[in-house]
Image (tube, coloured by chain):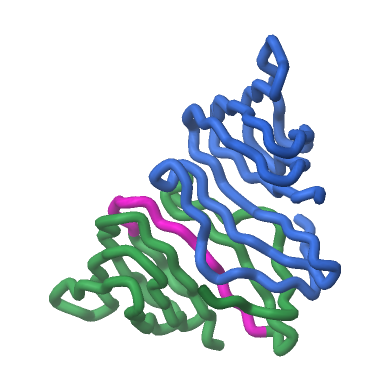
Chain colours: A blue, B green
């Protein structure tokens, strides 16, 4: 368990894929933004605006990163980067808890 | 949309009912604690420790409060109180976004 201190949290959830993916947005004093989210098992495709660091807190998924030929397996405690203005695909195999940091 | 400022958020999600209900815990300077959560459609029974104020930000559910004979319909923008050390049942009819405040 860890925590973020002195943050602002948007009260309302972000809901994607009929609730397959939900998150809350937190904003730091520096203006940096992260989302803390949960993904139910399923297949998803996301489009980035900013570059993102996806930290997987718990769960199991495969990710197809932009330009990649093969899927990469990611488990709790691992992370991956996604460039700005790109699409990536996920196969979420078990309920996945994540922290997404927006990098620019 | 509204926000809570200067809070601490526990990074890891709380997961109940195989992900049917997930939430994040936020702690205020005063020590007060709330959870911001999402409930997928389904039937759930919860047990309280502290008394709780459940604010439904969006969604539709029926609640059977402790000692009540009949179910009460609750929609986004409405709320209900649950006493400490009690059990209550929910029938969540559409994805429900909530804010739960622990009152003692």
- From the viewer's side, name the closer residue of A58 and B46: A58
Question: Does B89 sit left or right of A50 as displayed?
Answer: left
Please give the name of the residue rendered at 41% of the width and 71% of the height, measured from the top-left corner. Answer: B57
Q: Is residue B38 magenta?
A: yes
Above or below, A3 relative to A6:
above
Q: Is residue B7 magenta?
A: no
Percent position of residue B4, x then y: 63, 78
Question: Does A43 sit left or right of A10 as displayed?
Answer: left
Question: Does B56 sit left or right of B43 as displayed?
Answer: right
Report the residue that reaches farthest toward the front. A85
Above or below, A22 relative to B51:
above
Please give the name of the residue rendered at 77% of the width and 63% of the height, measured from the top-left corner. Answer: A3
Report the residue that reaches farthest toward the right. A30
Q: Which residues are magenta?
A: B32-44
- From the viewer's side, name the closer residue of A4 and A17: A17
Please give the name of the residue rendered at 56% of the width and 47% of the height, measured from the top-left corner. Answer: A38
Percent position of residue B76, x then y: 33, 72
- From the viewer's side, name the closer residue of A51 and A71: A51
Percent position of residue B96, x then y: 37, 61
Question: Is the N terminus of chain A in the top left, top right, bottom left or bottom right quadrant?
Answer: bottom right
Percent position of residue B79, x then y: 35, 80
Above or below, B72 relative to A96:
below
Report the residue that reaches farthest toward the top. A69
Report the residue that reaches farthest toward the left. B70
């Amino acid at each position: 368990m860890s925590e973020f201190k002195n943050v602002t949290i948007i009260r309302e959830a972000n809901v994607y894929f009929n609730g397959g993916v939900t998150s809350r947005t937190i904003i730091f004093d520096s203006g940096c933004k992260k989302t803390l989210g949960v993904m139910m098992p399923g297949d998803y495709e996301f489009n980035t605006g900013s570059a993102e660091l996806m930290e997987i807190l718990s769960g199991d998924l495969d990710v197809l990163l932009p330009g990649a030929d093969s899927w990469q397996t990611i488990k709790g405690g691992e992370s991956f980067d996604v460039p700005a203005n790109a699409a990536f695909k996920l196969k979420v195999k078990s309920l996945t808890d994540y922290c997404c940091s927006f990098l620019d």
